[in-house]
Image (tube, rainbow, N blue to C red):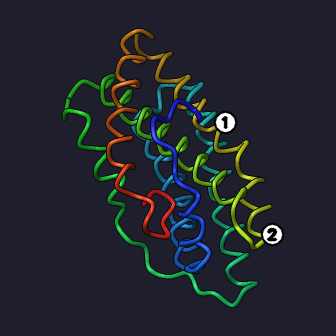
Amino acid sequence: MLGLKHETDKSWAVICEDNLEKLLTDHAYAEQKASGAAISLIINYSEESEMVQALADHAIEEMEHFKMVHDIMVSRNMVLGRDQPSEYAKYLRKFFPKTKDRTDALISRLLMAAIIEARSCERFKVLSDNLKDKELATFFRGLLESEAGHHALFLKFARQYQDRTIVDKKWDDFLTYEAEYMKTKGVLPLVHG
């Protein structure tokens, strides 16, 4: 799915179902971080008008998703917990060498965003197919198209700002790197854990 090289086992949905408040808190913050990452790209690459416009819409949509998750939590008498650092994002960042080249830095950030959106989409599919809680299963199913679209958006811009052959090689290597990490995950009720 979306080029990912490791699929989440459906048993992860059971872990999530037993820890919905933790899952939804993590999900809410993931949406908020996605919005913040888009805003950061806008600030740092403000000269890229086409990307700025697309990411402004993306940032708004991600905050709408945050509100949707929070509304579900409130309706279930859950409280948004504290944000926890993402070990997944920390691991992904290690793949890319530090660089002062603006284009290389942009490509790294776009590919990071693309893989995070792809993994979110894959995880939401697992939840939508396996949760016994039909309201939440339907909710996660409703996010699939959006997450897949976000993944495609970030890949499109990466391929626009650097030679596609180079980007596609980095993307394939990055997918392999991400898959190695995900082989040891699926034991916590975290969107990327």
Quarter-wise, where is residue 110 in the image?
top left
Q: Secondary structure at mark 2?
A: helix
**Dot 1: element:** helix
Query: Residue drawn at (80%, 61%), measured in percent from left and top?
Result: 138
Question: 10 Å neighbourhood of mark 1: few (<14), some, or many (≥20)?
Answer: some
The answer to whether 87 appears left or right of 130 in the picture is left
Q: Which residue is mark 2?
A: 134
> Any mark on residue 11, and which?
none
Tell me whether the residue at label 1 lies in contact with that at label 2, contact meaning CB atoms closer than 8 angstroms. no
Q: Quadrant of the N terminus?
A: top right
Q: Nearer the viewer, residue 92 or 7?
A: 7
Q: Position of residue 97 (x, y in %)?
A: 20, 32
Q: Position of residue 26 (x, y in %)?
A: 51, 69
Q: Which mark is residue 149?
A: 1
Examine the rendered structure and indicate whether residue 19 appears above or below residue 6: below
Is residue 176 rendered to the left or right of residue 58?
left
